[in-house]
Amino acid sequence: MSLNPHRPWRNITRRPSRKIWVGKVPVGGDAPISVQTMTNTITSDVKATLGQVLRAADVGADIVRVSVPDEDATRALKEICRESPVPIVADIHFHYKRAIEAAEAGAACLRINPGNIGDESRVREVIKAAKDHGCSMRIGVNAGSLEKHLLDKYGEPCPEAMLESGMDHIKILQDNDFHEFKISVKASDVFLAAAAYTALAEATDAPIHLGITEAGGLMAGTVKSAVGLGNLLWAGIGDTIRVSLSADPVEEVKVGYEILKSLGLRTRGVQIISCPSCARQGFDVIKTVDALERRLEHIKTPMSLSIIGCVVNGPGEALMTDIGFTGGGAGSGMVYLAGKQSHRLSNDQMIDEIVRMVEDRAAQIAAEEQAAE
Ligand code: SF4
């Protein structure tokens, strides 16, 4: 990532890590931080699962994980992997045969803890299947399912126990000459997760999958994830993220992107900067932003838009955004393009006009990019 010499306070130096591949998506090294989600349909219902994968991919998911608890699921996985526009991670818990079937079905990555699948011969079989089919793996340590001997040793889930669990699983893969793996140490407690991830980041150069597990519903889980993941990402830790919400996977992807966007780590779509509004507002800021968020959801081109109620902060914010609108009284406001005053717009036309300007600018950027290729 290039550092910003003019605004050094915005720089985040990412922890160096190895690069692995989840299908066509690089994870770690200099790869962009990828956004993942997980389906919550019955996997054997191919139509429903694929529908969810497609909707998640459409809002920007780079990778989607699918649970494969039984043979029906691994059978369905074949079609899901074939039809999915993004790599599929097969989520396996204890059944090593499901892992082999998932690799054969086209999964790009197996989420599996090698220490939980039985004896050495089973581990070797799974690793062979992964190698034969070009699958990477994710070791997924979770505070809620730590090994009994670690709970006995440490008394309760703690950062040291989570790190030890992760390093034990890593050793099994490395002893079998398998290095295409990433690792997570998730907890629902942000302090525990942050401490475990920080220790992990010191102990290995494997790419790190970040997540605050079981974070809660849309609102509470978003805040908790933003605090937990935001703190780690800001410290440069994390190569791929999944926000876990008791909500539609599409929401998980949107929240994941917003966290990355707020730290300048990824850009996608329109980033709206808007004021909270007050008695000075020259138009209804809240209703306008709500309408713009919905009507600009289809824009994928990175762009910034400021929607500010009055001149107190409007011109200043417009300086830092591609397109700006500032309320100005008398039923109209000022449009700014690249920070410069452009033209006045009446309040009753502003939503349609701003949507048109954003769409035009997105098309222009896309054409410029195409011409440059
Ligand atoms: S920018 Fe103006 S309208 Fe918006 S909150 Fe500030 S003072 Fe109020």
Image (cartoon, rainbow, N blue to C red):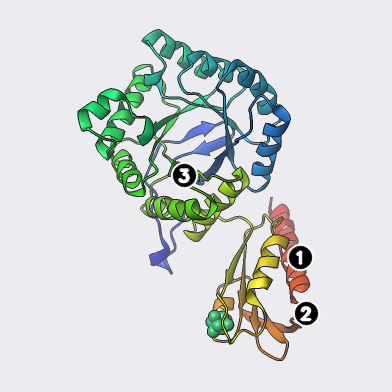
Q: Which quadrant of the structure image shows residue 76?
A: top right
Dot 1 and dot 2 residues touching (CB under 8 Å): no
Q: Nearer the viewer, residue 118 or 264?
A: 118
Residue 155: x percent and y percent? 22, 33
Position above or below: 128 against 230? above
User: Depth-wise, is mark 3 or mark 1 nearer the camera?
Assistant: 1
SS class, disc 1: helix
Residue 338 shows in this picture: no
On whether ligand 1 comes within 8 Å of the CB at mark 3, the answer is: no
Q: Write the residue at 38% across / 41% down.
A: 187
SS class, disc 2: loop
Of the numbered discs in the image, which one, if any, rests on residue 30? 3
On whether ligand 1 comes within 8 Å of the CB at mark 2, the answer is: no
SS class, disc 3: loop
Residue 303: x percent and y percent? 63, 63
Label 2, label 3: how many angstroms apart (C-alpha)?
46 Å
User: Depth-wise, is mark 2 or mark 3 nearer the camera?
Assistant: 2
Apparent side of residue 172 relative to residue 264 in the rendered image (left or right): left
Q: Which residue is mark 2?
A: 348
Q: Write the residue at 36% across / 20% down.
A: 115
Q: Write the residue at 32% across / 38% down.
A: 200
Position above or below: 61 against 147? below
User: Depth-wise, is mark 1 or mark 2 nearer the camera?
Assistant: 2
Q: Amino acid at mark 1?
A: Asp
Label 3, label 1: how many angstroms apart (C-alpha)?
32 Å
Q: Nearer the viewer, residue 350 or 250?
A: 250
Q: Amino acid at mark 2?
A: Asp
Of the numbered discs in the image, which one, if any, rests on residue 360? 1
